Amino acid sequence: MKGSKRKTTRTSRQSKIIGQNINPSQFGLTLWQVTDLADFLGLAVKTVYNKVNKGEIPCYKRGKFLYFIPSEIITWLMVGGRR
C-alpha cells in the first residue's frame, strides 16, 4: 500500500527491544518513554532530554531509546526532583 504507514504499538516496540516476545506489563512492570514522561511532568520533550543528559532524571537507555520506571520517577519527585 503506497503511502500508508504501519503503526507500531508500544507493546511491540518493547518486545523488539527485549529481543523476545515478552511484554513487560506481564510482570507488573510499566515503562514510560520520553513522551510519556514529558506529559506526566508537564514538560517539553526537549526539556526531558536535556535533564536526562545532565543526569537529573533517573532513566534507562537501551540502544537509542530511553525508558523510565514510573515508581522511580515518583520517588525522584518526592525527594525533590534531584538525583
Image (cartoon, rainbow, N blue to C red):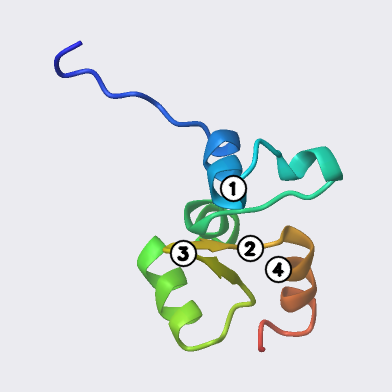
For the point 67% across and 52% down, the residue is 31
Which is nearer the eye, 48 or 13? Answer: 13
The residue that mark 2 highlights is 68
Let me know if residue 74 appears in the view: yes
Q: CA distance from mark 4 to mark 2?
A: 7 Å
Describe the element under mark 4 as helix, strand or loop. helix
Q: Which label lies toward us, 4 or 1?
A: 1
Q: Mark 4 Cα within 10 Å, few/some/many (few <14, many 20+)? A: some
The residue that mark 4 highlights is 73
The residue that mark 1 highlights is 19
Labelled disc at residue 63:
3
Q: CA distance from mark 2 to mark 1?
A: 19 Å
The reply, left or right, for residue 82 in relation to residue 37 is: right
Are the residues tagged 4 and 2 within 8 Å (C-beta)? yes
For the point 81% across and 38% down, the residue is 26
Q: CA distance from mark 1 to mark 3?
A: 12 Å
Question: x and y percent of residue 52 in the render?
Answer: 49, 78
- Which tag, 4 or 1, sits closer to the chain's start? 1
Let me know if residue 44 appears in the view: no
